[in-house]
Amino acid sequence: MATTNQELQKWVDDVARLTRPDNIHWCDGSETEYQGLVKQMLASGELLELNQDTHPGCYLHRSDPTDVARVEHLTYVCTRKRDDAGPNNHWLAPAEAHERMDKLFEGCMQGRTMYVIPYCMGPIDSPYARCGVEITDSPYVAVNMRLMTRMGAAALARIERDGSFVRGLHSIGELDPEQRFIMHFPEELSIKSFGSGYGGNALLGKKCHALRIASWQARQEGWLAEHMLIVGVENPQGETHYLACAFPSACGKTNLAMLLPPASHAGWKIWTVGDDIAWLHVDDKGQLRAINPEAGYFGVVPGTNAKTNRNAYDMIGRDTIFTNVAVTADNQPWWEDKDTGEPALDWQGRQYTPGNGKAAHPNSRFTVAAKHNPSWSPRAEDPSGVPISAIVFGGRRRELAPLVYEARDWQHGVLVGAGMASETTAAATSKVGVVRRDPMAMKPFCGYNFADYWAHWLALGERAAEPPRVFHVNWFRQDERGRFLWPGFGENLRVLRWMIDRCEGRIEARDTPIGLLPHPGDLDTDGLAVEDDTLEALLSVDSSAWQQEMTEIGKYLESFGERVPAELKARQEEVLKRLS
Ligand code: OXD
Ligand code: MN
């Protein structure tokens, strides 16, 4: 018996009987195991060695070309009652979903090894952490899980101590898009994923457990599982404020979490606690605290260079698994906007020719342990997490949303989050660049009905002694010629500073119908090539466009029916009234 937890052992035995693997490997999470799996995948061609002189410990995985992103249309939340999953999720009755999935899993691991991966989401000794076990037939998943989570013996020991874990069953199957489903059973704390090896579909600790299942669990237990980065901003006096920021996929969360202060900001430091997921709890003193359940990054590669994200650029120079990037003639990884070198082979391993499209896939990724990030915060290991001063929502909006505004209070903040919209990106397989509603950046990840989720947000604020302030930012405003109005990247620190000054009560703000905006003089633009009229445009509120937006938000809320909290509707009506 590989574990003293009988439930786990029984589940592993049952899965083995169903899937019929040749071997079973219980992952211990050791370096020797990692190196052994890498060696095995180099031999099988699942990994390719990159230039070890320039990129020690770096490897490339080329996925099946039809398996390069999350598949939202094939992702289901299977609750007993359909309304519990809500209009925001695809739904199937649990029995039907199990039947469909078990047919696919039958015998699917013949000729393969089954990996049993115990993992812990969150610091191993944190009361806020939760464990899971992923069973998979993909060694690529096993090595990625080791980089992304606290995986192996320590996690198994905690499972044996606590007795509880989320069950995640995964097989790459034949990587057939017609036989691909990602099913969640929140009431059973279990996941079944078949037919994809792509991170968000296959590394079950991440989106499937830490967001969809955890959001459900969080509602039962009185906390929040959110699609948020966690960043610490340290001022020259040595005071650090932590912000939790929700942005949709591929909208710059990793860049903001690792921001390098510009030369104008000597003495400022940024600390990365997390770049994608935050679990938020109100502690016994009423303070909102956050942990990052992950231990690594699965970040978008294209666009990463020494100017946009120096920390990430340095970090992925070693001990990184790249997925779907291009390579140079001397076998270094290459991607669009890398700023050095040129591609010889594209992400599919073909001779690079511009006629074939981008050299690196737009959703190509790096997987790397968080500790390699130069701005990694040791507080990421703090079992009690970090205190949160502000919640920040943001989207990718060419127009309308100003650079930054503040909600009047927590309840209005929940409306701001619920009304979020953003242009779609290559992180999911659908049309890119279409504006869609993405409340709290959780559209693809909330494991239950959004109406109940908003009610839960409102209730959580009531438990906080002093709820954090809530802001909305938009780094992506463009002029009519398509040029960005705000320089972004490191300069976003100026906006973070304004928010922190607001939290500390150091400055006033300008009251507008949509919320509180900076007085232009309070946003430090010294040394920036941002003209006064550009700043005015960035901080303007177009009443008639906002009336339309608020009306649409109202209709969107109504589409969730009776379950939408009356408080949220009242807040939407109030803003609309102010606008008229
Ligand atoms: C991600 C995503 O990979 O949001 O983080 O798609
Ligand atoms: Mn994400």
Image (cartoon, rainbow, N blue to C red):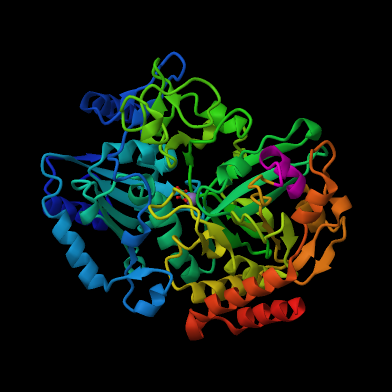
* Residue 366 screen position, x and y as percent: 44, 35
Say which of 434 and 179 sits in front: 434
Q: Is residue 287 above or below residue 201?
A: below
**How many marks on residues?**
0
| Quadrant in the rendering for residue 570 | bottom right
Residue 80 colored in magenta in the image: no
* Residue 205 screen position, x and y as percent: 39, 50
Say which of 500 and 15 sits in front: 500
Residue 494 colored in magenta in the image: yes
* Residue 458 screen position, x and y as percent: 61, 74
Say which of 209 and 515 sits in front: 515
Looking at the image, which residue is at 65% across and 47% down? 481
* Residue 24 screen position, x and y as percent: 18, 41
Dominant secondary structure of the magenta stretch? Answer: helix
Q: Which region shows up in magenta?
A: 485-496
Looking at the image, which residue is at 65% across and 60% down? 288
Horizontal side of residue 42 vs 458, given as left or right: left
Placement of the C terminus among the 4 image quadrants? bottom right
Q: Is residue 182 visible?
A: yes
Q: Is residue 324 visible?
A: no
Horizontal side of residue 195 vs 445, given as left or right: left
Q: Is residue 84 above or below residue 179?
A: below
Horizontal side of residue 232 vs 36, given as left or right: right
